[in-house]
Amino acid sequence: MAQSSAKKPRELTGFAVLMWLVGFFGFVFAVNAVMVKAATSTFGGVETASSYKAGLMFKQAEVAAQKQAELHWRVDGNLIRDKAGETVLDISVRDANGAPVSGLAATARLEHPADARRDHDVPLSGIGSGQFHGVADAGAGRWELIIDLTRDGRRVFLSRSRVTLQ
């Protein structure tokens, strides 16, 4: 008599199906929790706090840009990293005739394109007529350099430039 050594197939029970479903959705929930944590901890902020207000200000910005263009100023910014690793910014402001422009106050900012938490103000000091110098501690990478020149508390020049620090 030959006895059959074939195994009996495993029976799928309701408890096993329940465990598979709980395990699957538990795994999905855990992955979602990790992704939400990563997303909220790396979000650097919004570019514009109020799109509506920015839209209303557009016409004023357009008029200011036209006035700025009529000045025909030449504003040169030299941004380098020195051997100590500090970011050095030198700004020169000249009028349409090439003469230095006096009576200005300048501010500069390095904004990171993806993370507002990495932005740096560059404290500037006047080193002569139409000349400014500042040092910041910005790392290598791509930045947006914003130079703002004011006279008597009114903005007369604004420049936004993409720069890469080595």
Image (cartoon, helix red, strand yellow):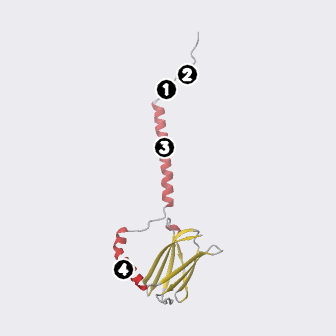
Q: Which mark is residue 26?
A: 3
Tag 2 secondary structure: loop
- The residues tagged by marks 3 and 1 sit, at their Cα atoms, a distance apart of 24 Å
**Residue type for callout 2:** Lys
Tag 1 secondary structure: loop
Q: Residues within 10 Å of mark 1 (few under 14, many from 20)?
A: few
**Residue type for callout 1:** Glu
Q: Residues within 10 Å of mark 3 (few under 14, many from 20)?
A: few
Which residue in the protein does label 4 denote? 63
- Please identify, in this view, whether the residue under mark 1 or under mark 4 is nearer the observer: 4
The answer to whether 127 appears left or right of 73 in the picture is: right
Residue 24: x %, y % from top left: 48, 41
Residue 128: x %, y % from top left: 55, 89
> Given contact means CB atoms under 8 Å apart, are the residues at marks 1 and 2 in contact?
no
State the residue in front, 123 or 62. Answer: 62
Tag 4 secondary structure: helix
- The residues tagged by marks 2 and 3 sit, at their Cα atoms, a distance apart of 33 Å
Q: Earlier in the sequence, mark 4 or mark 3?
A: 3
**Residue type for callout 4:** Val
Which residue is pictured at 48% across the width and 54% down the height? 36
